[in-house]
Image (spheres, helix red, strand yellow):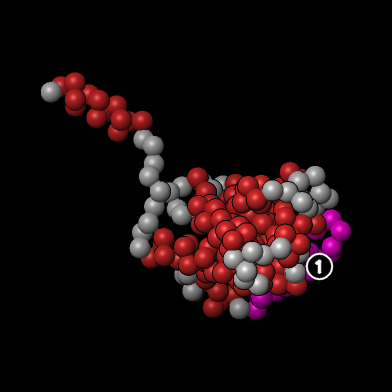
Amino acid sequence: MMQFSQIVNVSDFVNWCDYLGTLAFAISGIRLAAGKGFDWFGAYVIGFVTAVGGGTVRDILLDIKPFWLVQPSYLIITALGLIFTIVFRRQVVRLNHSLFFFDAVGLGLFVVVGVAKSYAADFPWWVAIIMGTITGSFGGLLRDVLINETPLIFRTDFYASACVLGAIVYVLLGRYTGMAIEWVQFISAISVFIARVLAVVLHIQLPTFNPQSVLRSEEEKGGR
């Protein structure tokens, strides 16, 4: 079984996940803002909120100073995302699936970051799962609220559920296998990405609670 000291280590791989996830989420937010007709500054703000929103909520809940307040690199990475989107705007806009791709990549990477940082702060496994889910999904939630869209995590999309799955994979592999921590984190991120892609390709959706359908069903039974 993997030693706890190995599990809690915020490795270089996690740092790469953090930076690449920031870039991916920033691009997804900027891409969506561009589709809404935002100017460059507005697009940057949306990209930045998308990139750091989940991690900020996580750090506040863990009683840690939000990471981007002490590391300006996240501001710079978001700016690079804006520059990338401006330079390759035709390709990014024409590719209908570009927003989904960058969002799915960021989702997987940030789940790893959330779980690893929770362990590093000496929190138990169940908190790590929750924080991994928050880190992955809450940036998109804040993005959607700011652009006046129904947040993905409140729709039938397999979004936050993919984060939960990836976080559970991280915890189980970390606790019950002797796998190197980098492989645990890699498999966790990939599992989120694959779950998100398969859910969209295969039209996998979570069931919804519709009070009207329940009432109609009761009325039909009463009519019989």
Prevailing secondary structure class for the magenta stretch in the rendered image: helix
Q: Residue at x 67, y 65 (%)?
A: 2
Query: How would you rate the neighbour count of disc 1 (Cα within 10 Å): few for under 14, some for 14-19, many for 20 or more?
Result: few
Residue 188 seen by the camera = yes
Q: Quadrant of residue 168?
A: bottom right
**Which quadrant is the C terminus positioned in?**
top left
**Which quadrant is the N terminus positioned in?**
bottom right
Q: Nearer the viewer, residue 86 or 73?
A: 73
Residue under label 1: 73
Residues drawn in magenta: 68-87
Q: Nearer the viewer, residue 184 or 148?
A: 184
Q: Is residue 85 magenta?
A: yes
Q: Quadrant of residue 115?
A: bottom right
Q: Nearer the viewer, residue 152 or 178?
A: 178
Q: Residue at x 65, y 78 (%)?
A: 87
Q: List the single residue furthest toward the top.
A: 222
**Residue type beneath disc 1:** Ser
Q: Residue at x 19, y 27 (%)?
A: 220
